[in-house]
Image (cartoon, helix red, strand yellow):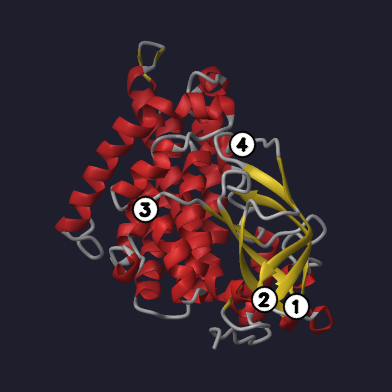
Amino acid sequence: MNTLYFTEEHESFRQSFREFLQKEVVPHIEKWEKEGTIERFIWKKFGEMGYFGLNSPEAYGGLALDLFYTTIFLEELQKINSSGFAAAMWAHAYLAMTHVHKEGDDRIKKAYLTPSIEGEKIGCLCITEPFGGSDVAGMRTTAIKKGDTYIINGSKTFITNGVYADYMVVAAKTQPELNHKGISIFIIDSNTKGISTTKLDKLGWRASDTAEIAFDNVIIPAENLMGKEGKGFSYIMQHFALERMVMSINAHARAEYAIEYALQYMSEREAFGKTIDKFQALRHKIAEMASEAEMCKAFNYSVVKRLDNGEYVVKEATMAKLTSTKIADKVAYGCLQLLGGYGYMEDYPMARLLRDSRLGPIGGGTSEILKEIIAKILIDKKNYKPAT
């Protein structure tokens, strides 16, 4: 146990959550990966156990626990070899629900946050657009106010839980002429007239539902605006720190899982009269990969601690995601190689893990965008500030 960050209570939670996953989730993973659909019952079981409310306020049914419970939640989800299933869970709890928690008023929290914590409602976050990608400020979706309503037009893509979701947290421009300063955040029921979804076929994350969503003259009440009009870009940027830490933790946990599996395989696989964990070239490869993964984990934990303390860690979270996802890809590739031909077989976990890992340097801001953000901070002395 890492006593610098984790208590006995944390470790008890880790053990109980691990047992829950083995009992309630693992038996269904192959089916969900094959069919590309996660059955609804598991969301309710997560809700019943309180797993969706770890860092949500008690007033709305959450547990208000520190972010190291979230860290454990994310790490253990990566150890069951379905990043798609993991993504469906954390995109609900830490993307959609974060905006509802932070920007929603009391009415919205009662209507959406509480049932989200209970697993009765599933949420998705709709920011990325077909022509925008990482360019959040360049979004084209509009929300034009008309009386006591807003009319939404536009499209979003690569939306995790986009088909499953009961509600959508949608970024749209209320004043398109103001560019990023004209973006606002709305909450919209998925069954609202004018919304259509198309499920996307992906390289990895096969169990998760990723959608393209179209909004055709979607009319919503003006009270579905979350936070202040025109502050949406600031809210998105502020929450990116948490999203990038989520993906950083996923990455180091995924790398650890790959190394653990490779070590087990190497201890059993024999060649030339001895197990292959006795060959120096392979031993040193493991030593190198484990060292890099451990460095990422240590840095990630330090950033989680600062985030939990309320610090604004845009630079550190961006660095964490950039590096951790790069290392996770490298480790997945290296561990697959250690399994030889078996690494390429679907009966072994490395093929799926390699595919799933590849999304790390893309989702939540591509590595290229992250490098530019870091460069702006270090070279141009850009000072990112929290939303006010």
Residue at screen point 54% across, 29% down: 33
First in sequence, mark 2 or 4: give its number. 2
* Chain-order first, disc 3 or disc 2: 3
Q: Is residue 335 above or below residue 388?
A: above
Front of the two marks 4 and 3? 3
Residue 48 percent across, percent down from the top left: 30, 47
User: Can see residue 57?
Assistant: yes
Mark 1 or mark 2: which comes first in sequence?
1
Amino acid at circle 2: Ser
Q: According to the image, label 3 marks what residue?
A: 118
Give the side of residue 342 with respect to residue 168, left or right: left
Q: CA distance from mark 3 to mark 2?
A: 27 Å
Element carrying mark 2: strand
Vertical comparison of 43 with 145: above or below: above
Asked if marks 1 and 2 touch (Cβ < 8 Å), the reply is yes
Give residue 372's position: percent from left, percent from top: 69, 71
Q: Amino acid at mark 4?
A: Gly
Near mark 2 (Cα within 10 A), the count class, few <14, some 14-19 or many ≥20, is many
Please indicate whether residue 6 sits to the left or right of residue 257 in the image.
left
Identity, as a three-letter code, of the amino acid under mark 1: Thr
Q: Mark 1 or mark 4: name the one nearer the start of the chain.
A: 1
Which callout, 3 or 2, points to the residue nearer the camera? 3
Count of numbered badges drawn on the protein: 4
Image point (53%, 21%), residue name: 340
* Tag 2 residue: 184
Which residue in the structure is indicated by mark 1?
174
Percent from the top left, x then y, of residue 10?
A: 22, 56
